[in-house]
Amino acid sequence: MNTIKPIYISAFALLVLAGCGTTKEVINTTGLSAITAPLNVKKKAPLKENELKRWSHLDIVKDTIPGMSVDRAYAELLKDKKGVPVIVGIVDSGVDIEHEDLKSVLWTNIKEIPGNGIDDDKNGYIDDVHGWNFLGDITKENLEYERIIKDKTLADDATYQAAKVLNDKKIAEAVAGKSRLEEMLVSIKDADAVLVKHFGKPEYNMEDVKAITSKDAAIEKSKMVMQRMLSFGMPIAGLKEAIEKDLTDFKALTNGENLKMDYRKVVGDNPNDITDTKYGNNNVIGPEKKEALHGTHVAGIVAQSRNNNLGGDGVANNVQILTVRAVPDGDEYDKDIALGIRYAVDNGAKVINGSFGKAFSPHKQWVYDAIKYAESKDVLFVHAAGNDAKDIDFADNYPTDADDKKIEYADNVITIGALNYEYGDKVVARFSNIGKLNVDVFAPGVQIYATTPNDSYQFLQGTSMAAPNVAGVAALIRSYYPKLSAKQVKYILMDSGVAITTNVIVGGKASDTRPFSTLSKSGKIVNAYNALLMAEKMSKK
């Protein structure tokens, strides 16, 4: 199943999921000291919405929020410096390239004459002005285990049996979850109607709800319901839509419709033939703009225009977003990912963000080869760790840079776990995958505010949001220190991070506390300020 998309994709998943030490490492550059975690400090007051909108940019010391010190890095380290443009490949569901906050940061293929129907640069893709769409006109897709069940030739018998077991499990969950979701939907609709009447306006936020003081039982009940629902970081309309979608998916699971669909026939290629490359189109938004929500949000985290009084700010300036549409509503095909990575590399990307993943990968070698190709071209691949609250040192989560989960076949992949904005024992997002060997570092991934289609902005969460936060910092390093290699940037991101040496809650279970240092290879959280200090020092060697 697709484990990487943010948890807004499954409202049922929301229901199911429903003090720090100092590091001894100090980096000195021109008299500046690296940021370390303050001891036993927690933010006393809850974050206001305007603080929440940029918490990932804030400073762990000054603000007592586990942000990446992005604002501090710009103010203290970059204010008198000029960087070079860096192309960042967004391999995702598509990007709304018409968005007001992204139009100025798009990569444009200057070798291609727009709209002439000719492959001017002779790269095999006609009119690929801002990227390429390997999905054509499809938005929905099967999950990989469903494809394996439908076609036994895709896997060995053990994998086929594992796919059947997972399908049976999903059907059982659908049966059990259907009534809960129906009750939840009724509760949301009833509470929303009460509060819309109470406020006298159709939309309201968490601060509005928390400020309610009323002795009316219906209003108080609705307040409690909506505080819970708004805590998921989604607008109420979006949450209703997600629940209704889950109910539709549950129906397809229980009656077997999911195994009867063949979405790929619309594309017209053979997804099991890596040499069949002439497919897709140049519409990187996709056939339905709303379906580009995930990719648009990811792109915004990296590069939405800074300091323009629109929405939020991207992590990186001097960035050009190259869009590869390869991740549908369902599981991505290995072929699309492999060709998408190669496309981004061949068109100059120095950082590629991959906020996708799945538990089965029939043609994983194609993706591995593409990652190794990226390594040979000095391109960093930033990958989301997944949202299943599992230890991926044991659970499968593709793609990976170590097929046996131990020995890496490439050194240009960095895998990212997600942080919560609460600095303390709840600092690890309850949904985030972990792994002492296979997760490299953690970054902000809960309630991240960024661009969404049609000039809108939303809070979303998932390791899908943590990865582009890191891709943004990587792009900063590659912009201001372009001589550093992808491998060097990877280890700067890991080694310069802020170490947390206390125990934290894992998987949202208060009974499961572990040292933060055991949850990833570095035991750290990404910090842009420290990373730039280390990059400065390394660039002078």
Image: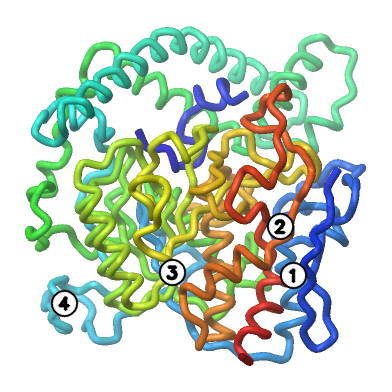
Asked where in the image residue 538 lies, by quadrant, the reply is bottom right
**Mark 4 surroundings within 10 Å by alpha-carbon count, few (fewer than 14), some (14 through 19), many (20 or more):** few
Q: Are marks 4 and 1 in contact (CB under 8 Å)?
A: no
Spatial CA distance of label 3 from label 4 is 22 Å
Instruction: Classify 10 Å Cα crowding around label 1: few (below 14), some (14-19), many (20 and above).
Output: some
Q: Of marks 4 and 2, which one's residue comes earlier in the chain?
A: 2
Mark 2 to mark 3 CA distance (whole Å): 25 Å
Q: Is residue 239 above or below residue 314?
A: above
Closer to the camera: disc 2 or disc 3? 3
Mark 4 → mark 1, Cα distance in angstroms: 39 Å
Q: Which residue is mark 3?
A: 380
Q: Which residue is pictured at 72% across the width and 72% down the height?
A: 529
Kindly identify which numbered label has been placed on residue 123. 4
Residue 182 locus on image (x, y percent): 49, 12
Q: Amino acid at mark 3?
A: Leu
Q: Are marks 2 and 1 in contact (CB under 8 Å)?
A: yes
Residue designated by label 2: 54
Q: 497 or 42: nearer the eye?
A: 497
Q: What residue does disc 1 label?
A: 71
Label 3 vs label 4, nearer the camera: 3
Q: Position of residue 483 (x, y in %)?
A: 50, 88
